[in-house]
Image (cartoon, rainbow, N blue to C red):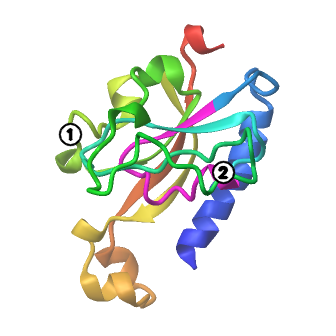
Amino acid sequence: GDHRDLHLSIRRQRQMCIRDSPHYGENSISICVGKEWYRFPSSFFLPDNIWDLKYIRSEFKGQLPQPYEVTDLKKSTRLIRDTFNDQNKQEPNRFVKDPTKECHYIVDQAVHPDDQTELEPNFSVIQPNVWKEEFSSEFLDPRRSHSFFRAFYVPVYSESRCTFNNYTLYKNVSPGML
């Protein structure tokens, strides 16, 4: 329920914010995800074909999805690619080299500083001149919230026993991305 509501809210907000951006109407707009790749639904839910879902390196070391081949839609789900493996090993071709130059937007969860790593930073803190928070919504922090109150909402008590992070859409505002 809450995950779906957050997704719909972010999607609506993202469409409103991004359609007003100077990028809208260009050949492609890149939405990038890092550690949140498994929560972001897929490129299937992006508004149209000018949107690209791309990946930023994170602590996850398994194989990430690839976009569907759009040149021949009849074969798009049957296509066999050399960059898939049956051992769930990471494939380097899935990642952008430099998010500041290749990502118009990043969808990420701004986590507690103790949970951040070099590969999973808070983007607006490490590069405040590049990443501007466009939209944000609270997201439950399971590590810092009581297990009972994560599962069951109890008025008055749940608020004091649950901790939240921000699930955020960052916009690249660096001069090179205009």
Q: Residue at (73%, 38%) from the top-left corner? A: 71
Residue 153 drawn in magenta: no
Secondary structure at numbered mark 1: loop
* Position of residue 24 measured from the top left corner of the image (x, y, whole percent): 78, 27
Query: Disc 2 marks which residue?
Result: 76
Q: Is residue 70 left or right of residue 104?
A: right
Question: Which callout, 2 or 1, points at the residue further toward the start of the chain?
Answer: 2
Q: Which residues are magenta?
A: 30-45
- Identify the image quadrant of the N terminus: bottom right
Front-most of 66 and 134? Answer: 66
Query: Disc 1 marks which residue?
Result: 117
Residue 32 drawn in magenta: yes
* Position of residue 48 measured from the top left corner of the image (x, y, whole percent): 78, 43
Q: Residue at (62%, 49%) from the top-left corner? A: 43
Q: Is residue 109 left or right of residue 89?
A: right
Q: Is residue 115 left or right of residue 94?
A: left
> Disc 2 and disc 1: Cα gap in Å?
36 Å
Front-most of 120 and 144? Answer: 120
Secondary structure at numbered mark 2: loop
Front-most of 178 and 90? Answer: 90
Q: Residue at (40%, 32%) from the top-left corner? A: 93
Position of residue 155 relative to residue 63, above or below, is below
Q: Residues within 10 Å of mark 1 (few under 14, many from 20)?
A: few
**Does any portion of residue 128 appear in the rendered image?**
no
